Amino acid sequence: GLPAHLVFHLKSRDVGLGWRAGLSWEDPSVGLRISALYTAPMAFAVSGSQWYNGANAGTTLTADIEMPQSLALRFERDVAPGWRGALDAQWTEWSAFDDLRIKGATLMNGIGDAVLSTGFDDAVTLKAELEHDLTADWRAAASLRWDQGVSGAVPDLWTLGASVARSFGDHVELELNAALGWRMAGAASGVDSITGRSWSYRSEAGPVYGAGMRITLAF
């Protein structure tokens, strides 16, 4: 049989090409803005090697990956002078990435395709945001976001976010943001298609956090 510790090292040096199409509509009389954005699937190739118990098996692996399509909707409205509220919804077809087929793997019955199941389902993301203009150059925002889990191993995530941004003229904006979230507990189980062994996974609920900075240039 196969050794207990089996690892696939895969990297991508490929360039994936995709496209997006969007529509937007605005009614300045009531400060209402509605937009929709469709992102098409994007495919790229990965390659790498297979390792047994820390040793390179000497095989060359290849796989094709297609990132899923998605559809995003946004509703934004002025709720008071200097205040804006927004609702975002996005659907992503993660079920299209239900498995990863790795070609050239060493299996128990020789060289063949290793099929790794993800068990992903389609997922929805919902976000509510409130933004306020502090001054002509400064603005702040707060948000609440829910990311639906794509599988038992990747459960739901709730996130509180906050950001502050400063404009430098009409062409440059600097934004600082931070987020604190809570990942729900998750569990998954199955049978390894390569070794035939049963497996199970369980994660406890717990906090997640992050911070970032973004610079926007407009011409």
Image (tube, rainbow, N blue to C red):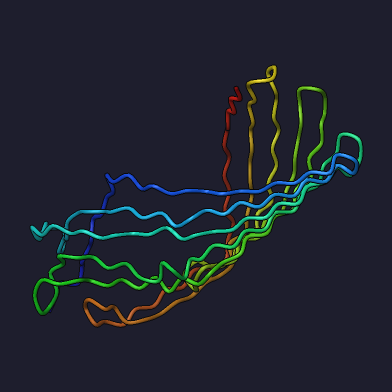
| Residue 167 falls in image quadrant | top right
Image side of residue 162 versus residue 132, left or right: left
Image side of residue 14 versus residue 219, left or right: left
Q: Position of residue 165 (x, y in %)?
A: 69, 30
Residue at image location 64% in from the left, 38% down from the top: 177
Residue at image location 48% in from the left, 66% down from the top: 94
Image side of residue 118 versus residue 64, left or right: right
Q: Position of residue 168 (x, y in %)?
A: 68, 18
Quarter holding the C terminus? top right
Quarter holding the N terminus? bottom left
Badge count: 0
In-front residue for pair 26/140: 26
In-front residue for pair 184/193: 193
Q: Position of residue 128 (x, y in %)?
A: 74, 53
Residue at image location 36% in from the left, 55% down from the top: 43
